[in-house]
């Protein structure tokens, strides 16, 4: 009887984790779409050099960073996936959200400086595993680049 209670509790917690995690993720994606539309005018370039036509500008470093944690539902299914191998689909949306959020924060910083162009954009990603081998706890993404501001 005790094992049935434990299984039922486990299933209840997984269902709650799925429901609340899905809801939070959808809300974050909605927020990202709204803010991306707001900052659509900011030009990003992976190129290392500022165009010669923009010679009389001031260059400023802009950054945006974010730390996003994974929910228990995704972590559980990722651990199952690690047993059989293959891509960790449950973490792909986590990485997408983190990258988009970091870029948005970088764009917001550039706009606050009066810039509409960011060159040499780079993304750095690191994971924090809480001391557990092969277990992703959170992901940090740092976006940085050179914003140009007219003098």
Image (tube, rainbow, N blue to C red):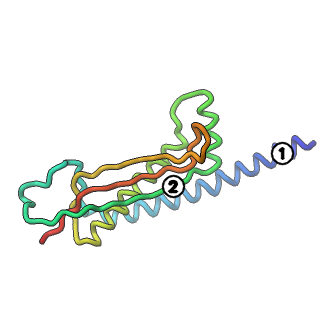
* Category of crowding for the residue at label 1, using alpha-carbon neighbours closer than 10 angstroms: few (below 14), some (14–19), many (at least 20): few
Viewer-closest of 60 and 96: 60
Q: Is residue 36 visible?
A: no
Q: Is residue 114 visible?
A: yes
Percent of width and height locating residue 57: 12, 65
Residue corresponding to mark 2: 68
Q: Residue at x 63, y 39 (%)?
A: 77
- Classify the position of the N terminus by image quarter: top right
Q: Residue at x 12, y 72 (%)?
A: 151
Percent of width and height locating residue 32: 42, 60
Q: Residue at x 59, y 54 (%)?
A: 22
- Could you tell me which secondary element the residue under label 1 belongs to? helix
Q: Is residue 3 above or below residue 66?
A: above
**Residue 34, label in figure:** none
Mark 2 vs mark 1, CA separation in Å: 30 Å
Q: Is 91 placed left or right of 116 in the picture? A: right
Q: Quadrant of residue 118?
A: bottom left
Residue corresponding to mark 1: 6
Of badges 2 and 1, nearer the viewer stands 2
């Amino acid at each position: 009887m005790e094992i049935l209670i434990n299984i039922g509790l486990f299933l209840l917690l997984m269902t709650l984790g799925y429901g609340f995690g899905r809801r939070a993720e959808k809300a974050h994606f909605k927020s990202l779409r709204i803010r991306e539309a707001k900052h659509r005018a900011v030009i990003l370039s992976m190129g290392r050099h500022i165009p010669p036509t923009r010679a009389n500008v001031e260059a400023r470093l802009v950054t945006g960073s974010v730390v996003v944690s994974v929910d228990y539902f995704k972590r559980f299914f990722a651990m199952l996936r690690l047993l059989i191998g293959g891509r960790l689909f449950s973490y792909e949306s986590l990485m997408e959200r983190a990258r988009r959020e970091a870029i948005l924060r970088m764009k917001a910083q550039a706009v606050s400086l009066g810039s509409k162009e960011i060159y040499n954009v780079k993304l750095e990603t690191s994971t924090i595993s809480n001391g557990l081998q092969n277990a992703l706890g959170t992901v940090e993404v740092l976006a940085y680049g050179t914003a140009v501001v007219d003098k």
